Image: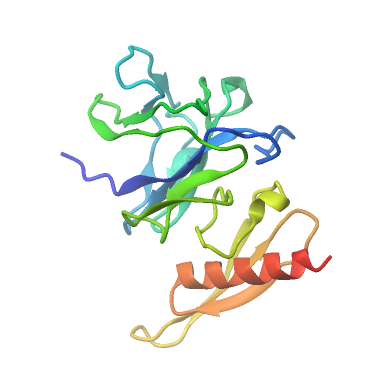
Amino acid sequence: TIDYTIVVNEFMAASLDCCDDGTGEYEDFIELYNYGLEDIDIGGFYFTDNLTGSFLYHITDSSTSETTINGGEFLVIWADADPEQGPLHVDFKLSSGGEDIGIYDPDGSAIIEMSFSSQSEDTSYGRYPDGSNTWQFMNPTPGMVNTQELTLKNFKKLPTYKLISNTGPRHKPIFKVGVKLPNTKYFIATGKSKKEAEQNAAIECLKNTNKK
């Protein structure tokens, strides 16, 4: 049995003015988080919004560069019923009234099966901190670390991260990461881990963008 180190880290089921799926449309999403060290390719996996139904949406296994989740990173699946828009767009939408999320490996074995209750507009439900067992309603942060300080929904765009450097001795590394939103410069921050640096950079980015 393969140990898939992925969880549903955040999802939104009532999109109105958030979040841009890259085509100019605001859509619901399912964010996956790989809490392990090894990369995981979800190509060939199956997704559903009904655990008791027979419908399973198959993620193509021919777009590895788009369907691979690096260790410690995130991958956003758009639940928009627009599969023609790319391999990360599944052919169903999430119901704001509550429903299910099921994810299965290529052999059909369940990796994740969960249900959720009613959701509010432009509010996501996610784990805080990332990968933990604690869930809360929050401002949507698709593809980004979940923090209580962020209000990404005000910007309606996905961030772009860039690892600038990893210096220092192995027992005491210093990660420097840049993050930007569309039409902003890169905001730089450091941390004792890549994740911490990403979070610090995100906070700086949104703090400075809020001033405008």
* Residue reaching furthest to the left: 1
Which residue appears at 72% of the width and 52% of the height? 154
- Quadrant location of the N terminus in the rendered image: top left
- Quadrant location of the C terminus in the rendered image: bottom right
Which residue appears at 49% of the width and 26% of the height? 97
* Residue reaching furthest to the right: 212
Give the image location of residue 90, x and y in percent: 51, 25
* Residue reaching furthest to the top: 54
Left or right: 8, with 212 as reference point: left
In which quarter of the view is residue 3 placed?
Answer: top left
Which residue appears at 75% of the width and 70% of the height? 208
Counting labels gives: 0
Q: Is residue 57 above or below residue 137?
A: above
Give the image location of residue 159, x and y in percent: 64, 54
Residue nearer the viewer, 122 or 192: 122
Left or right: 168, with 23 as reference point: left
Residue nearer the viewer, 135 or 178: 135
The image's colouring method is rainbow
Q: Is residue 71 above or below residue 97?
A: below
Give the image location of residue 148, x and y in percent: 53, 62
Which residue appears at 58% of the width and 48% of the height? 140
Left or right: 101, with 187 as reference point: left
Q: Is residue 207 above or below residue 28?
A: below
Give the image location of residue 58, x and y in percent: 41, 22
